């Protein structure tokens, strides 16, 4: 199977699982379920769920049911996008080439749709089959911490808000990034590994893989915002500079940012050595995440 | 111990547990932790956590550690108040006699503070000691369902938003209430009972107690909005009528609403019969909730 066949197969698997967890558009109250599905099925690349599944596959063959843990990650990611796009936060009208949730459903429903996706993520982890209560509660803890305020995703959003217009330093940049996108990407890898029963050393190696690939991913994200058009990105390009965000190109320049992303990618690959050919998909995903054009 | 001594002792217990779970105001990012604490320590009555603890006490003596499950309920309740008060939803400036979160911290931080409290609720349940992984995962599931979109708290908020200005029918009223406040009150009782290891029959009886007391509580809440001043309530009085909300007084009139609240209270008491003197505090709490003046 080529990487694009693998990605397509995993996307279908994740989409089917998401579809089974999210109430249908005919379940009342219909508005909220329509809004949840609008953002969830908007052509997202499913990078976090696929990383989760591939990490589980690096630990053992056929980790059946891991797609449910993967769903929880996509639910949290999508909630964060909806709330981030709100007028009070990034005030964005466009996401994945379509109007943002509050543009379509209004701010009240967009806020509640985000809340609903976050709540559903924990419902999925608590209800899913195929793994012990010990494992499920550990996954809940990983997700809550990664999404939280102490070094987690919300910490990153707050640092990001408060950093706008501040002097961009490497320290501030690292702090924002590690929390804002790094924590959830790291958790994606870790949750897959935990689901598959990884030992401590395996978990440590995969966590470090997650850190490196998370950093590389963010650098590329910042670079795309500078180098690509809104059309290609499916979201408003050039917003970081307009909002005076603290980004890798702003701190290190474009050339050096590209070199940093490649160096992080190298380190990420190295972390996978102990896994041999089992980690094939993680290697390929890492390259894909860093060399993407949108 | 009189009821007010009991309430004061339990409030202290819950506040101490909350204080231990919520990062301090000096933990970065400080803004978000200040905002979380501002709403959490605003003189709330802690009705949900105390119901949770009293339900556990009806099942067994000294259910040590149940205050952590109780904290998760208060975290979810407080998140819902912050988001409910936002300009896009109820647009309220006053809560518990103080300016609402978005008035003090701005909308962006208020949205993120709500998100943070919801996330922390699941972190607390996944990290707390004193009970098995099976029990903790069951508590996660109860809380996620009660806070969710299918008959849960968010369903109630959406029905409430969409109901504004609609013809108030008994059916619509019941649907809104059961979801909006009923689900979390029921979960408060159930989570305490589950924590304490209640059998199926005990859990069923306590769930029905929760349904009756939840309904009585909501009727009284609607009545207070009509009959009390903003000063006494610590929030804007008369808002329901101004926003053409579907309330018990609007559907049944004031007199009949009072009689309905008393009838529900009677039924609630009856559900506690099998528990004998162990349910003393639940009996007292039920009376307190229905006969409160604010």
Image: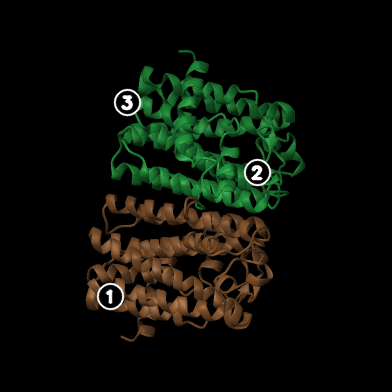
Chain colours: A brown, B green
Q: Nearer the viewer, mark 3 or mark 2?
A: 2
Count the labels in the image: 3
Q: Is residue B207 above or below residue B288?
A: below
Q: Secondary structure at mark 1?
A: helix
Q: Residue drawn 55% across and 77% down?
A: A223
Please tell me if label 3 and label 2 are on a single chain.
yes
Q: Secondary structure at mark 3?
A: loop
Answer few, some or many: residues within 10 Å of disc 2's Cα (few below 14, many 20 plus, some between 14 and 19): many
Q: Answer whether labels 2 and 1 touch (C-beta < 8 Å).
A: no
- Residue B101 — which label? 2
Mark 3 lies on residue: B60
From the top left corner, tell me how far across and down residue A156 is, in percent. Answer: 53, 58
Q: CA distance from mark 1 to mark 3?
A: 50 Å
**Quadrant where the N terminus of chain B lies?**
top left
Residue furthest to the right: B242
Q: Secondary structure at mark 2?
A: helix
Q: Chain of mark 3?
A: B
Please tell me if label 2 and label 1 are on a single chain.
no
Q: Residue drawn 27% across and 59% down?
A: A130
Q: Residue drawn 51% across and 24% down?
A: B286
Mark 1 lies on residue: A279
Residue A227 shown left or right of residue B134 in the figure: right
Q: CA distance from mark 2 to mark 1?
A: 47 Å
């Amino acid at each position: 199977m080529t990487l694009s066949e693998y990605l397509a197969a995993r996307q279908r698997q994740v989409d089917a699982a998401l579809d089974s967890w999210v109430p249908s558009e005919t379940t009342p109250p219909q508005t909220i379920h329509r809004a949840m599905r609008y953002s969830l099925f908007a052509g997202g690349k499913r990078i976090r769920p696929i990383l989760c599944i591939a990490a589980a596959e690096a630990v053992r063959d056929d980790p059946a049911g891991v797609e449910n843990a993967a769903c929880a990650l996509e639910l949290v990611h999508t909630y964060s996008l909806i709330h981030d796009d709100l007028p009070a936060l990034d005030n964005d009208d466009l996401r994945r080439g379509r109007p943002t949730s509050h543009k379509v459903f209004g701010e009240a429903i967009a806020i509640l749709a985000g809340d609903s996706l976050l709540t559903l993520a924990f419902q999925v982890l608590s209800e899913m089959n195929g793994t012990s209560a010990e494992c499920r509660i550990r996954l809940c803890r990983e997700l809550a911490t990664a999404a939280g305020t102490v070094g987690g995703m919300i910490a990153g959003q707050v640092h990001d808000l408060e950093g706008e217009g501040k002097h961009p330093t490497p320290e501030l940049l690292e702090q924002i990034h590690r929390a804002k996108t790094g924590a959830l990407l790291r958790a994606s890898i870790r949750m897959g590994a935990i689901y598959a029963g990884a030992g401590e050393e395996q978990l440590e190696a995969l966590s470090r893989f997650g850190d490196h690939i998370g950093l590389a991913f963010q650098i590329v994200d910042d670079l795309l915002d500078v180098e690509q058009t809104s059309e290609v990105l499916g979201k408003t390009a050039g917003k970081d500079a307009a909002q005076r965000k603290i980004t890798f190109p702003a701190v290190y320049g474009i050339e050096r940012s590209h070199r940093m992303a490649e160096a992080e990618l190298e380190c990420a690959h190295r972390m996978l050595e102990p896994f041999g050919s089992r980690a094939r998909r993680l290697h390929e995903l890492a390259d894909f995440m860093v060399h993407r054009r949108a």
